[in-house]
Image: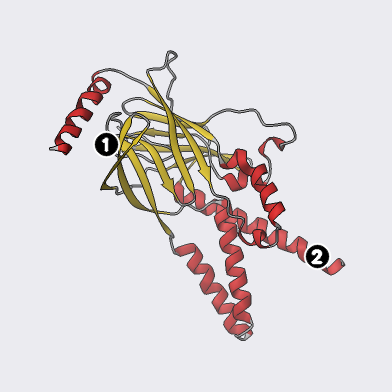
Amino acid sequence: MKNIITLLLISLLSTSFVAQDFQGQAFYKTQTTMDLGSWGDRMSAEQKKAMKERMKPYLEPVYILTFDKTKSIYKQEERLDAPGSGGGRGWGRMMAASGGPVYKDVASKKSLQSTEFMGKKFLISNDEDNIKWVVQNEQKMIGNYLCFKATAQVKKPKTMTSVWRNAEKNSKEAKDDGKQENIDNQTNKKAEKLDEVVVTAEVETITAWYTPQIPVSHGPAEYGGLPGLILELTNDRTVMLCTKVVMNPEKRIEISEPTKGEFVTKGEFENIVEVKVKEMRDMWRGQRGNSSRRN
């Protein structure tokens, strides 16, 4: 009986959205837990604290999802960089790994992310991604909206930091193996470990809370496909929480498909990132080696 009343209430609240040509905006505050990897082992508590403060603007950005019945665009809120912040250069942007605007059209099942990497623009297609949601028997209130829980298993994306971290891990394991194996076996193991990194796909569980009161299949970043707007999503080390929803804003915003950049699939872009990070790491290790020999 309770479930029937809940469904009737949701149906009444959502009818107005279905019946009209509406537009809405959802504001998401994101929070990412920073993983310093092997560098963190060499830093003092004070250094870690200073690093986290410096990285805060990149780890806790605000995004705006503008949507209608079928289309949406997810963009980071524009902000002014503080004096001396460097405008987001270097490790700030690399470790934040937020990417660019994400456009979705649920009618044509199209999803494109516009991003820039190493000075080149890309349009990344997420069309092949098919998230298989499992709706759970849990609900909670987020603001004034009744939300339902859903989970899914997805492949972890490859980012600059994750590729670098895996390379560091494999390098350490290879050195440990070298203490116990002869040179030939060590070489074979390195090759096997590299193959594992490239071929094996890490999987993570994502959790979403969606509200049928706003009956659109949109959500933050590339996520969506549920019978209601996603107001909260957790994946790996990041939480995206909707703090405000504005329906039918006074100024209508055009939701247009991005067109600038080289078109690539998500898998192709991850391969590009992996190759570039390997080049950067080899160059960095070479510079360290030359510096050590001079000293």
C-alpha separation, residue under disc 1 versus residue under disc 2: 58 Å
User: Quadrant of the rendered structure where residue 290 is?
Assistant: bottom right
Nearest the camera: 39 or 257? 39
Q: Quadrant of the C terminus?
A: bottom right
* Residue 180: % across, % down: 61, 85
Looking at the rendered structure, the secondary structure element under dot 2 is helix
Q: Nearer the viewer, mark 1 or mark 2?
A: 1
* Residue 249: % across, % down: 41, 17
> Around disc 2, counting alpha carbons within 10 Å, would you say few (fewer than 14), some (14 to 19), or many (20 or more)?
few
> Around disc 1, counting alpha carbons within 10 Å, would you say few (fewer than 14), some (14 to 19), or many (20 or more)?
some
User: Quadrant of the rendered structure where residue 170 is?
Assistant: bottom right
Left/right placement of residue 123 relative to residue 216 reads: right
Nearest the camera: 157 or 205? 205
Is the image coloured rainbow, by chain, by secondary structure, or in one colour? Answer: secondary structure
Callout 1–callout 2 Cβ contact below 8 Å: no
Q: In the rendered structure, which amino acid carries the disc numbered 1?
A: Pro
Depicted 131 relative to depicted 245: above or below: below
On residue 290, the disc is: 2
Q: Quadrant of the N terminus?
A: top left
